[in-house]
Image: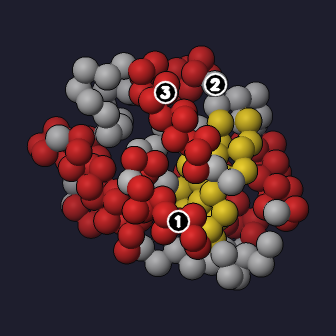
Amino acid sequence: MDTAQKSIVLIGMPGAGKSTVGILLAKELGLDFIDTDVSIQVQQGKTLQQISDESGYMAVRDCEEQVLLNEDIAGKVVATGGSAVYSEAGMARLNANATLIFLDVSLPVLKARVSNFNSRGIARRPDQSFDDLFTERSALYQQYGDITIDCSHLSIDEALQAIVAAVISA
């Protein structure tokens, strides 16, 4: 893969390690790094949770779609928010310009990692449980992921090396 021409986009549930692995992947490959959650917060001047509390979870998704459609992602590693997969237009743009890597993590592992579900700024319906969110999003991640890496039992370094190996062979 010519990383100067194509980007690498990480998708997956909150707690999958997209931001953590993403910045290490960018360093490993000598690419710039974008975290779309951070981009939203910088543009809005608020945390994701504040946006959700003030305007509802769909406002977070709308902001995310705008970032996905407008952010310069050329030759970069992009860690998306977990709800990026709800934006067909955003995902179409990413798919056209990047290799999408689904960091697949089992529900029990995610639940152990995400202790702040109610305050993390996760774009979800107010009555939606983590289990229901996982079920709803899993099919979308599988649909959009060009490459799936099962990270349930991998350390950060092992996940990084698995992604690098997959990207090099793609």
- The amino acid type, in three-letter code, at marker 3 is Phe
Calculate the distance from the C-alpha at mark 2 to the C-alpha at mark 3.
9 Å
Looking at the image, do the residues carrying marks 2 and 3 touch, with CB atoms under 8 Å apart?
no
Tell me: 146 left or right of 128. right
- The amino acid type, in three-letter code, at marker 1 is Leu
Residue 125 seen in render: yes
Please tell me which of labels 2 and 3 falls first in the chain. Answer: 2
- The amino acid type, in three-letter code, at marker 2 is Ser
Q: Quadrant of the C terminus?
A: bottom right
Tell me: 108 left or right of 64. right
Vertical arrangement, residue 149 with respect to residue 153, above or below: below
Residue 29, percent from left and from top = 75, 70
Name the quadrant containing residue 58: top left
**What secondary structure is marked by label 1?**
helix
Calculate the distance from the C-alpha at mark 3 to the C-alpha at mark 1.
22 Å
From the viewer's side, name the closer residue of 62 and 46: 62
Vertical arrangement, residue 76 with respect to residue 86, above or below: below
Task: Characterize the local packing of mark 3: few (<14), some (14-19) or many (20 or more) Cα atoms within 10 angstroms.
Answer: some
From the viewer's side, name the closer residue of 112 and 56: 56
Q: Mark 3 points at which residue?
A: 134
**What secondary structure is marked by label 3?**
helix
Please tell me which of labels 1 and 2 falls first in the chain. Answer: 1
